[in-house]
Image (cartoon, grey):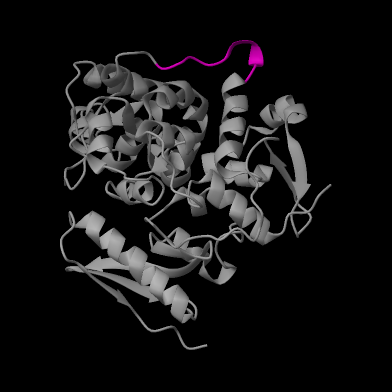
Amino acid sequence: MAVMDNRALNRATLARQLLLDRADVPVLVAVGHLGGLQAQEPQEPFVGLWSRLRAFDPAVLSDLLTGRKVVRTHLMRRTVHLVTADDAVAWRTRHEAMLRQRVLGTYRRELDGVDLDELAAAGRAVMADGEPRSMAELTRALAERWPTRAPRALGEMLIAALIPMAQLPPRGLWRTKAGVRNVLLSSWLGREIDPPSPNGSDPVGEALVRRYLAAFGPAASADLRAWCGLAGLPAAVAAIREELVAFRDERGRELLDLPDAPRPDPDTPAPVRFLPAFDNALLGYHDRSRIIEDTHRGLSVAGARVVLVDGRVAATWSVEADTVSVTPLRGLSRAERTDVAEQGRELASFLSDNADRQVRVAGSPCS
C-alpha cells in the first residue's frame, strides 16, 4: 500500500478544496462540490468562496440564498452550514439522530423527562402557519406546556435537531446583519425532506462517503466522522469499498480515496490563500496535520481566520478599521511576505468594493 506523506496529502487537500488553483465553476456547483461551507458566522462563506473561485461575485451567492437554491441549516456536526437545497433535502434525515444526540450532550439535564416526540409535534404545530420565528418566539409559544424547562434547551433541541429548519434571508446575505429567523425547511424549499432509507440500506451514507472523499480525500474513517459528525458510516464505507483505493499516511493510518480524484505532485507550488473562520479545509479532518501544525490546532476551533503559505497555516488575519492585518505564526521569507501582502491587498479590495484599503503584515514571531 503506497504511503502519502503530509506534503502529498496537503496538495491533494488543496486541489480538492479548490485552493490550489481558483476554479472557474458556478457558485452553486462549488458549494455542492465542497459539501457545503460552515456558516455559523454569516459573512465567512463569502471569503471562503472568494479564495476558491475565479472572479467570485458575492451577489451571486446572495441571490442563490434568496432564490432558495442554497440554504442555511443545522447539519454536519450540529453547526450551521450553507448547503445546496438538494443536499439539505437529501441529507437532513440521515443526520437527525446525530443532531439529537449532540443537543442532548449539551442539555441532557435540562431536557431530562421531556418527551422529544411530543416536543417536536408541538413545535411543528406552532411553525405550521409558515411564519418565520426566532428561537425565543418559538419557545415562548411553548412556555405554557413546559413552564419549568429552560427555553434555550427547548429551542436548541427544536431548531437544531427535531425540526428541519432553514434560516431565512436577510441572514447570510452579503454585508447584511440580521438576526436568525427560522421556518420549516420543507416550507421554504417547497418540497419534503427525503425519508429514511428502507430495509436498512444506506444510500445517503454511501453518497456522503463519496462526496466527502471528492472534497477532502484521501482521508481516514476518523476524518470522515470528524467532518459530518456521524458515527454510523462504517457500513457505508464497507459497501463501496471496492470502488475505492487505499493509501497509508506516515503514521500508518489507512486512507481511502476515489480512484480518479486529483492527487497532485507534492512539489506543486501552492499560492497564498486567506481562509475564513471555521473553514472546513481545517475542520473537515480529525488529523489536521496535513494543513496545520499541532501546536496551532486550537486556532481552527477558536474561529481564527488563517492564511495558508505554501499550503499550510502560517498566519492569522483580521480586519481592523480599514486595514487587513496579518499576524505570522512562523518566520516568513521576504518572498512569502510579499506574496501575503499582495494577496491581502486583493482581499482588502474584495471586502471594500475596490476601495483603497491597507494591508499590514506584522513582524515574524520570535523563535
Q: What is the x, y in percent for residue 68?
A: 28, 25
The image quadrant of residue 182 is top left
The image quadrant of residue 54 is top left
In-image side of 312 versus 182 (left or right): right
Asked whether the viewer can see residue 229, the reply is no
In-image side of 33 versus 134 (left or right): right
Magenta span includes 200? yes
Q: What is the x, y in percent for residue 3?
A: 78, 54
The residue segment tinted magenta is 193-202
The image quadrant of residue 261 is top right
Q: Residue furthest bottom?
A: 366
In the image shown, does 272 or 133 lie closer to the viewer? 272
In-image side of 167 versus 14 (left or right): left
Q: Residue furthest right?
A: 1
Q: Is residue 46 above or below residue 142?
A: below
Q: What is the x, y in percent for residue 193?
A: 41, 17
**In terms of secondary structure, what is the magenta stretch mainly?**
loop
In the image shown, does 236 or 248 lie closer to the viewer? 248
Q: Is residue 293 above or below residue 181?
A: below
Q: Is residue 297 above or below residue 112?
A: below
| Residue drawn at point x = 22 percent, y = 29 percent | 66
